Image: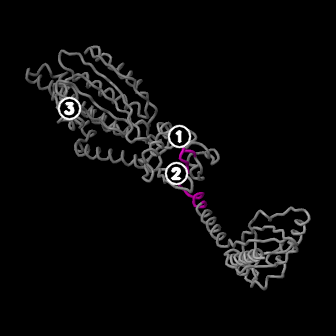
């Protein structure tokens, strides 16, 4: 008897505990019979639907449903009771509920079937997800807005994973590199890079993952990109490191700077040429070459007549005066012609074309063949590249420098001249615009040399360090410098008296189309 009372007390306590749990639960709990009639509804359920518990108990649960579930709910139960097949019982799903006010709202419903001795009941747990759905909607709207910005952005945007595989590419980036978006997704990002970055990119990423040393992430820099057609172009790349829930990705923002780089190079060359021209203008603005031609021709003409018709009548001193006058007039004529040649470097320039410097050098050596044989000069050279250039001016450049190297030789020693070429890159990885890549040509001799304190003078017109000992007007190196500047480079020299001279000429490989 005592055992029976103990069991009854325990059962009452369990029911009380269970009722307390149900009554204080945050989620709604509703119990219905096999006909859909609500037998219980906890306060949370009543609050969720906007009713009091009394307004719900005894009524069909379909009152809490919008159409079509409102009309079809009884058939759902009948089908389950006859077939055992249910759409939600024992599974749980997201559904719509209907409040007393008629307002619809989303909730997550899970239903459990409970078989009692005398009947079967169903218990539904209702979890209001209105706020969650609002958050999801706001997130979707935010994602949509961000995606819209990405898709319509003027600059290219590409996202890669930590292996360098492209996960996202916007239309601007695809267009910039001349691909369709589907051709890039899933491919390694280094397909968009020229060498050496194409081969080294995996090493760059590995180095960053191992050391955390940033070379471009969060910094930004100018690099070169590779289009589908093989064209290399300059771009400004900034990379952001983004931590997602379970992994890390990198987003690159790509700005095409082709026009900017072209403008910068045009401006650089224009400024260099303008500075040089202004300095030269100050040096020889007073020389009016054309105005000097006419009086000089008269001096030469009357001097020639005097020598032909009256020469025998002159004293020895008079004959010497005439000879010296004609020699001076001849030198003056050569100076004027050289000055005109100097002025024509720019005014008579030809369009740029692909010029094989190896072929140019061979032609110049052929033209200087007699001079080379007479002096016993030995000329060695390494292979020379092909560049965009004015072919006539390249011949002028080599002819002036090699003839100078032969002319200014040491007495009793045959000239030995070496011509070499090296390709240079002014900035790492920038190879896509004129001026990024240069060719450096060195012409080294074993001649008389000069003191480098006169370095600036030797490239000015009519500057001669050796006076009248060697033939010439001193304008050849000025012409060479003007040609080099027009071709995106310059000239300098290294020398010591009695040791020899090395002239160093730089020329751009590519020019504006």
Q: CA distance from mark 3 to mark 1?
A: 61 Å
Find numbered disc 3 in the image and state the secondary structure of the residue it sits on.
Answer: helix
Q: Residue at x 26, y 14 (%)?
A: 376
Q: Is residue 6 visible?
A: yes
| Image location of residue 429, percent across then percent down | 43, 41
Circle 2 Cα neighbour tier, 10 Å, few/some/many (<14 / 14–19 / ≥20): some
**Rendering coords of residue 410 (x, y %):** 19, 20
Q: Residue 418: name its quadrant.
A: top left
Q: Any mark on residue 250, and which?
A: 2
Mark 1 and mark 2: Cα distance apart in space: 25 Å
Magenta highlight on residue 397? no
**Rendering coords of residue 207 (x, y %):** 44, 42
Pinpoint residue 214: horizontal percent, then vertical percent.
42, 48
Q: Which stretch is magenta?
A: 147-165
Up/down of 116 relative to 200, above or below: below
Q: Earlier in the sequence, mark 1 or mark 2?
A: 1
- Of residue 326 and residue 66, the one placed in the foreground of this image is 66
What residue appears at the point 39 percent right and 42 percent down from the top-left corner?
427
Residue to which mark 1 is pinned: 231
- State the image quarter where residue 292 is shown: top left
Question: Is the residue under label 3 in contact with that under label 2 (CB below 8 Å)?
Answer: no
Left or right? Give the position of 255 relative to 68: left
SS at circle 2: strand
Q: Quadrant of the N terminus?
A: bottom right
* Measured Cα–Cα span from mark 2 to mark 3: 80 Å
Specify whether 324 is left or right of 205. Answer: left
Q: Estimate how packed mark 3 is, as few (under 14), some (14 to 19) or many (20 or more) residues with alpha carbons within 10 Å.
A: some
Count of residue discs: 3
- From the image, tell me which residue sits under label 3: 299
Q: Secondary structure at mark 1?
A: loop
């Amino acid at each position: 008897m005592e055992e029976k009372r103990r069991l009854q007390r325990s059962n009452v306590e369990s029911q009380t505990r269970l009722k307390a749990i149900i009554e204080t639960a945050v989620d709604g709990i509703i119990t219905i019979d096999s006909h859909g009639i609500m037998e219980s509804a906890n306060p949370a359920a009543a609050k969720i639907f906007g009713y009091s518990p009394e307004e719900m108990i005894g009524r069909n649960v379909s009152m809490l449903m919008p159409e079509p579930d409102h009309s079809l709910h009884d058939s759902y139960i009948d089908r389950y009771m006859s077939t055992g097949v249910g759409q939600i019982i024992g599974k749980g799903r997201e559904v719509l509920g209907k409040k007393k006010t008629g307002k619809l709202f989303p909730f997550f419903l899970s239903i459990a079937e409970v078989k009692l001795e005398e009947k079967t009941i169903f218990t539904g747990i209702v979890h209001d997800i209105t706020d969650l759905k609002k958050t999801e909607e706001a997130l979707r709207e935010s994602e949509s807005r961000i995606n819209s910005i990405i898709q319509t952005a003027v600059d290219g945007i590409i996202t890669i994973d930590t292996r360098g595989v492209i996960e996202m590419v916007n239309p601007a980036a695809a267009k910039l590199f001349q691909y369709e978006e589907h051709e890039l997704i899933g491919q390694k990002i280094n397909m968009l890079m020229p060498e050496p970055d194409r081969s080294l990119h995996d090493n760059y990423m590995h180095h960053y993952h191992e050391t955390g040393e940033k070379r471009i992430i969060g910094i930004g820099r100018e690099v070169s990109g590779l289009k589908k057609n093989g064209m290399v172009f300059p771009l400004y790349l900034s990379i952001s490191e983004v931590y997602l829930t379970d992994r890390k990705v990198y987003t690159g923002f790509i700005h095409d700077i082709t026009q900017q780089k072209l403008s910068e190079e045009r401006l650089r060359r224009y400024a260099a040429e303008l500075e040089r021209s202004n300095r030269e203008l100050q040096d020889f603005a007073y020389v009016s070459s054309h105005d000097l031609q006419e009086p000089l021709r008269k001096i030469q003409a009357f001097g020639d007549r005097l020598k032909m018709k009256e020469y025998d009548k002159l004293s020895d001193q008079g004959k010497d005066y005439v000879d010296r006058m004609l020699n001076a007039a001849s030198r003056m004529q050569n100076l004027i012609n050289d000055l005109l040649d100097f002025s024509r470097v720019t005014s008579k320039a030809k369009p740029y074309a692909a010029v094989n410097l190896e072929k140019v050098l061979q032609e110049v050596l052929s033209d200087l063949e007699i001079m080379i044989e007479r002096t016993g000069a030995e000329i060695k050279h390494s292979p020379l590249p092909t560049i965009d250039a004015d072919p006539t001016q390249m011949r002028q450049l080599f002819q002036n420098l090699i003839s100078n190297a032969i002319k200014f030789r040491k007495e009793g020693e045959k000239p030995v001249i070496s011509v070499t070429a090296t390709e240079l890159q002014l900035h790492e990885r920038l190879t896509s615009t004129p001026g990024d890549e240069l060719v450096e040509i060195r012409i080294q001799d074993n001649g008389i040399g000069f003191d480098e304190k006169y370095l600036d003078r030797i490239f000015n017109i009519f500057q001669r360090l050796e006076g009248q000992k060697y033939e010439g007007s001193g304008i050849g190196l000025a012409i060479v410098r003007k040609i080099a500047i027009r071709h995106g480079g310059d000239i300098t020299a290294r020398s010591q008296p009695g040791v020899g001279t090395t002239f160093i000429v730089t020329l751009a490989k590519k020019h504006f189309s």
